[in-house]
Image (cartoon, rainbow, N blue to C red):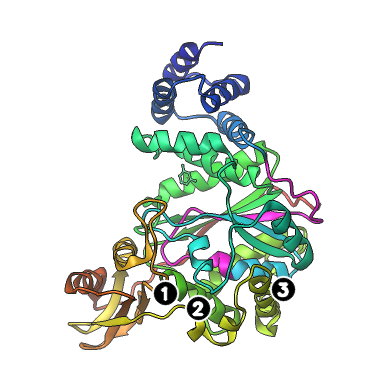
Amino acid sequence: MRAYDILLRKRQGNELSPEEIKWLVDGYTKGAIPDYQMAAWAMAVFFQGMSPAETAALTMAMADSGPRLDLSAIPGIKVDKHSTGGVGDKTTLVLAPLVAAAGVPVAKLSGRGLGHTGGTIDKLESIPGFRAELPTAQFLRIVREIGVAVASATESLAPADKKLYALRDATATVESIPLIAASILSKKIAGGADAIVFDVKCGLGAFMVDEGEGRTLARLLVESCRKAGRHACALLTSMDQPLGRTIGNALEVQEAIATLKGQGPKDLRELCLALGSEMLYLAGKAATPEEGQGILARLLDSGAALAKMVQWFKAQGGDPQVIDDPELLPQPTTVVQVKASQPGYVTALNARELALVVMALGAGRATKDDPIDPTAGIVLAKKTGDYVETGEVLATLQNRGTIDQDKVHRVERSFQIGDRPGPKPLILERIPANSNPSA
Ligand code: URA
């Protein structure tokens, strides 16, 4: 095979064979195919697209470009959950112990935040003592013993994706739906998932702003999973406003704990029950997602999921006392309120702008080794659909440094106030599992 011929065939709009795709990916990973040829191929894919079969082949080639995590020592169907990234998205912190409490093993690899959305690992590391960098043997032992562990993904997981993503980032080829689907899926498969529930977010605060593109990605993810022999389902969810009422690492841990105590925001609970019920269904623990919702609601209300969170934090070295006393989480030294300058309903909330302010407060990093302030964040007193009087608090900004007026004004301008409430539904569509794996 010659890289030139493969590029030409793709540029002309032909479907590549799985062998051609594997040859290209393996050659690129080893350094035998140079960046300029791979970049040309990515651009050809950007314009010509890829069929579901090509997407599945790319997924498997990238998943196999490094060692896969072998979860076979953990009994049961391992169902992973993947969110395409949103603002204030702390669902993993709630779902991991909740789903584990229902007997579904959770062996989850997560990332740190880069860009405008936060990372689960940064959130967990705001818990005093919590260790996310776990050797594989310890990670697997914790899952076997207590049913749940969340660790930082290692560098060796799907190295072809890492290399290709960096190339796409530099060549304006990130926004290709099949390349995105293969990138996401390759890491899930390399991480050992038997089945996957996708939370594909769309809206201002999401990676995919456009709802139609989000729907296309969600469908392609489910279809490519089927072709790759994995059961999957997706929820298309709105990310116009942040999820829950907090954005920022320690704040989000606190909100996840409150949710497991039955005191969290309604939207976060709704999404966790919806995603978790799909996980139970794919794991064969519920005959239908509706039955799964009932099981999970009981585990939340009985405190069983909270008890699992205590076990989980302890197993990874985290101080479980933070669950009873959230004051033990890192605390800010500066807190500034943002007040409404007119009365009315909050008609829209700019999630992306709020996320950028949270980053600027110290919660995010521009490069992967930057230190972060775990206390930096925003608490939203009002969300879309709420009524606000002039002078009432809209939001509170916090960190361990200074907070200038520019950030206060940016947050104030993120709230649109009008004369009618207008909240959009959170769950826009369910792209169902192709079949019940336990059937
Ligand atoms: N997230 C990923 O993991 N890969 C992409 O290509 C885009 C978003």
* Disc 1 element: strand
* Disc 3 element: helix
The residue stretch that appears in magenta: 68-93
Where is mark 1, residue-wise? Answer: 246
Q: Is residue 306 left or right of residue 404?
A: right
Point out the image quarter for the N terminus: top right
- Sequence-first disc among 2 and 3: 2
The answer to whether marks 2 and 3 mark residues whose Cβ atoms lie closer than 8 Å is no
Where is mark 2, residue-wise? Answer: 254
- Expressed as whole percent of the image width and height from the top left, the position of residue 67 reads 66, 38
Nearest the eye: 119 or 269: 119
Q: Is residue 85 left or right of residue 78?
A: left
Prevailing secondary structure class for the magenta stretch in the rendered image = loop
- Expressed as whole percent of the image width and height from the top left, the position of residue 88 reads 43, 67
Q: Amino acid at mark 3?
A: Ile
Q: Nearer the viewer, mark 2 or mark 3?
A: 2
Q: Is mark 1 within 8 Å of ligand 1?
A: no
Q: Amino acid at mark 1?
A: Thr
Q: Is residue 85 magenta?
A: yes
Q: Is 3 located above or below residue 351 in the figure? A: above
Where is mark 3, residue-wise? Answer: 295
Q: Quadrant of residue 289?
A: bottom right
Q: How far apart are labels 2 and 3 at the CA level?
A: 24 Å
The residue that appears at 68% across and 67% down in the rendered structure is: 99
The residue that appears at 62% across and 52% down in the rendered structure is: 233
The answer to whether marks 1 and 2 mark residues whose Cβ atoms lie closer than 8 Å is yes
Q: Is 163 located above or below residue 200 in the figure? A: above
* Disc 2 element: helix
Q: How far apart are labels 3 and 1 at the CA level?
A: 27 Å
Q: How far apart are labels 1 and 2 at the CA level?
A: 9 Å
Q: Nearer the viewer, mark 1 or mark 2?
A: 2
Nearest the eye: 397 or 414: 397
